[in-house]
Image: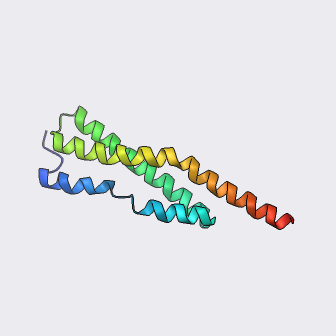
């Protein structure tokens, strides 16, 4: 079976894991209570996309691809998807807290 990509391409695929700079933007929006649907849907999309990248890494490992193929896919996918999946509830609760505060302010 031919390799899925070259070793030089595998180095560039490691940059897939660079979704960290968008987290402060999302947290700022959540803290302000803005763009709820866009932030939560993007958060889910990032989680699903990187989960699929991790699954592709597992498939590459099972099909006997070289280390630079499956490691670059699996690590980039797994170590990005897991924190996003674990923090989704925190972001959602921040929006809920903000909405409750807004509704209490309206009731006064």
Q: Quadrant of the C terminus?
A: bottom right
Question: Residue, x 55% and y 63% (percent of image)?
Answer: 38
**The image quarter in which residue 51 lies:** top left
Q: How many marks?
A: 0
The answer to which image quadrant residue 79 occupies is top left
Q: Quadrant of the N terminus?
A: top left
Q: Viewer-proximal residue, 98 or 5?
A: 98
Q: Is residue 88 left or right of residue 46?
A: right
Q: Please, is residue 3 above or below residue 99 in the view?
A: above
Q: Whole-percent x and y of residue 55?
A: 34, 40
Residue closest to the far top:
62
**Viewer-side residue, 47 vs 27:** 27
- Name the spot of residue 60 as percent of width and height, x first: 24, 39
Vertical side of 26 occupied by 55: above or below: above
* Residue at position x 19%, y 44% in the image: 69
Task: Tell me residue 59's x, y (percent).
Answer: 28, 37
Is residue 49 found left or right of 107 in the rendered image? left
4, above or below 15, in the image: above
Foreground of the two, 19 or 51: 19
Q: How is the image coloured?
A: rainbow
Left or right, 22 with reference to 14: right
* Residue at horizontal 36 percent and vertical 43 percent from the top: 78
Q: Residue at x 23, y 42 (%)?
A: 71
């Amino acid at each position: 079976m031919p390799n899925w990509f070259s070793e030089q391409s595998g180095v560039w695929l490691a940059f897939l894991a660079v979704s960290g700079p968008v987290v402060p933007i999302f947290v700022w929006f959540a803290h302000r209570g803005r763009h709820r649907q866009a932030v939560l849907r993007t958060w889910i999309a990032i989680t699903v996309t990187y989960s699929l990248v991790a699954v592709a890494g597992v498939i590459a490992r099972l099909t006997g691809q070289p280390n630079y193929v499956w490691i670059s896919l699996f690590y980039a996918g797994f170590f990005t998807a897991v924190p996003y999946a674990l923090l989704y509830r925190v972001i959602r609760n921040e929006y809920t807290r903000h909405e409750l505060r807004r509704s209490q302010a309206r009731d006064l």
